[in-house]
């Protein structure tokens, strides 16, 4: 059968009795299997269970290989998952299953969620479905590839310093980093627990909304409580003066001029201070998470790159950053969201690069391009704010140009309202 482009359309067909949930599942799995070898994003296919009745019944999803499953431990980017009796599903996976969703596969990720690209010596390189020469961001690499390739309507990922937003930006997707703590991290392997957030990748905002509502039904607003028309959204815009390529800056300016009324701001000094705290917390907590492996000298190279500097960070520096966090958040919210609904800034400072340009050790490697992929991401995790990657245009090579849209804590539904109004209608790049 021909599957609709949007998950919400398939849900409507199931509800209307035009197709059974079982036939819908099989059609999705058949499509994913047919594409599997082309994009190299699958780690393990999973034993299917009888789905519960619910709004996601008949929907086959795939997720980053970082979540515990029933009697199953994830490979976390360094190998295949392993059977282990007594293991219970991660809270996020269990919430989706309770809503009726079926998980078909686990997906490739950067080793232990350490990495802004899909570089991973343990697996075949993921291929960007939009452009085989283009980079795939990390660490939720396989999640982005599977969604962009239409192997799944949506996928869970995790975001510690951009690990949902970066691959979403590379693959032209909606990428929702949720408010820290909104989605339970139980059963999700940690990297830096104070920064880790479970989030969603999808092609369409309304599909992401269905996943969000299943994950956090208690945070779903009453019907009609969205931001309303596009003209009603109040926005601040920050375009950094340094590190942002002219073509990317101009594309964002053109999009804003066409769709929004914004107040331009300069938050460079604020950003630099927040980024220092974010990096300190990331390095210190990664070192604690992987402490034994780092001291024994057998930590994965991706972990060493973050964890070894973390071993040298004094505990009181870390504690200072953590003690200041609530005050920084309160100040940021008052400064940016008392007079605006959203804060818009670039997702990446450069056009989506070729994969060779951001692969460590490759002759074509350019450090500035790798830095440009994640430079404006990590401070959001330190604040714990929700943020959404939104494709807005294409560059000269037809690769996506994206913005980050930030909102106050627990305003995910408003970000999805915003994305639904502005998402690109033509998804073919």
Image (cartoon, rainbow, N blue to C red):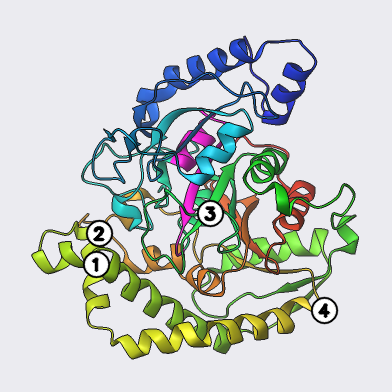
**Which residue, given by chain and number where applicable, does mark 4 sit on?**
339
Asked if disc 2 and disc 3 are in contact, CB closer than 8 Å, the reply is: no
Spatial CA distance of label 4 from label 1 is: 40 Å
Instruction: Work out whether residue 272 or residue 220 is closer to the camera in this orientation and state it.
Output: 220
Counting residues from the N terminus, which is met first, the one under dot 2 or under dot 4? 2
Sort mark 1 into few (<14), some (14-19) or many (20+) by Cα contacts within 10 Å.
some
Residue that numbered label 3 is attached to: 184
Q: Which of 101 and 377 is in front in this view?
A: 101
Q: What stretch is highlighted in magenta?
A: 143-161
Expressed as whole percent of the image width and height from the top left, the position of residue 366 reads: 31, 64
Residue 395 visible in the snapshot: no
Q: Name the residue under label 2.
A: 302
Badge 4 density bin: few <14, some 14–19, many ≥20, Cα 10 Å: few
Residues packed near mark 3 inside 10 Å, few (<14), some (14 to 19) or many (20 plus)? some
* Residues tagged 3 and 4 counted as in contact (Cβ below 8 A): no
**Mark before the other along the chain sequence, 2 or 3:** 3
* Image coords of residue 163 (percent x, y): 45, 56
Mark sitting on residue 305:
1
């Amino acid at each position: 059968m021909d599957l609709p482009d949007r998950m919400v359309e398939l849900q409507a067909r199931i509800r209307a009795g035009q197709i059974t949930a079982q036939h819908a599942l099989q059609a999705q799995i058949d499509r994913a299997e047919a594409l599997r070898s082309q994009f190299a994003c699958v780690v393990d296919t999973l034993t299917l269970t009888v789905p519960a009745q619910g709004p996601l019944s008949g929907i086959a999803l795939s997720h980053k290989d970082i979540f515990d499953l029933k009697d199953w431990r994830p490979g976390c980017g360094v190998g295949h998952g392993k059977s282990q009796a007594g293991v219970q599903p991660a809270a996020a996976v269990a919430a989706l299953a309770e809503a009726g969703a079926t998980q078909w596969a686990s997906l490739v990720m950067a080793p232990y969620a350490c990495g802004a690209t899909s570089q991973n010596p343990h697996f075949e390189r993921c291929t960007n479905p939009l452009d085989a020469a283009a980079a795939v961001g990390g660490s939720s690499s396989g999640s982005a590839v599977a969604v962009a390739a239409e192997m799944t309507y949506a996928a869970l990922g995790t975001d510690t310093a951009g690990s949902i937003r970066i691959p979403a930006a590379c693959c032209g997707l909606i990428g929702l980093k949720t408010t820290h703590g909104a989605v339970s991290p139980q059963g999700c392997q940690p990297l830096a627990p104070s920064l880790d957030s479970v989030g969603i990748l999808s092609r369409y905002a309304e599909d992401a909304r269905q996943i969000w509502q299943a994950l956090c039904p208690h945070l779903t607003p009453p019907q009609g409580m969205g931001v309303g028309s596009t003209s009603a959204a109040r926005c601040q815009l920050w375009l950094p003066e340094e590190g942002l390529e002219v073509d990317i800056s101009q594309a964002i300016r053109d999009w804003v001029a066409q769709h929004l009324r914004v107040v331009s701001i300069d938050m460079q000094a604020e950003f630099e201070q927040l980024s220092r705290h974010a990096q300190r917390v990331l390095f210190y907590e990664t070192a604690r998470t992987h402490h034994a492996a780092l001291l024994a000298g057998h930590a994965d190279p991706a972990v060493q790159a973050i964890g070894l500097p973390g071993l040298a960070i004094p505990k009181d520096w870390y504690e200072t950053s953590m003690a200041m966090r609530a005050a920084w958040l309160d100040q940021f919210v008052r400064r940016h969201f008392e007079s605006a609904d959203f804060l818009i800034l670039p997702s990446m400072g450069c056009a989506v690069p070729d994969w060779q340009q951001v692969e460590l050790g490759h002759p074509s490697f350019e450090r500035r391009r790798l830095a440009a992929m994640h430079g404006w991401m990590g401070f959001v995790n330190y604040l714990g704010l929700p943020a959404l990657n939104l494709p807005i245009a294409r560059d000269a090579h037809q690769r996506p140009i994206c913005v980050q849209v930030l909102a106050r804590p627990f305003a995910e539904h408003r970000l999805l309202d915003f994305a639904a109004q502005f998402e690109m209608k033509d998804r073919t790049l």
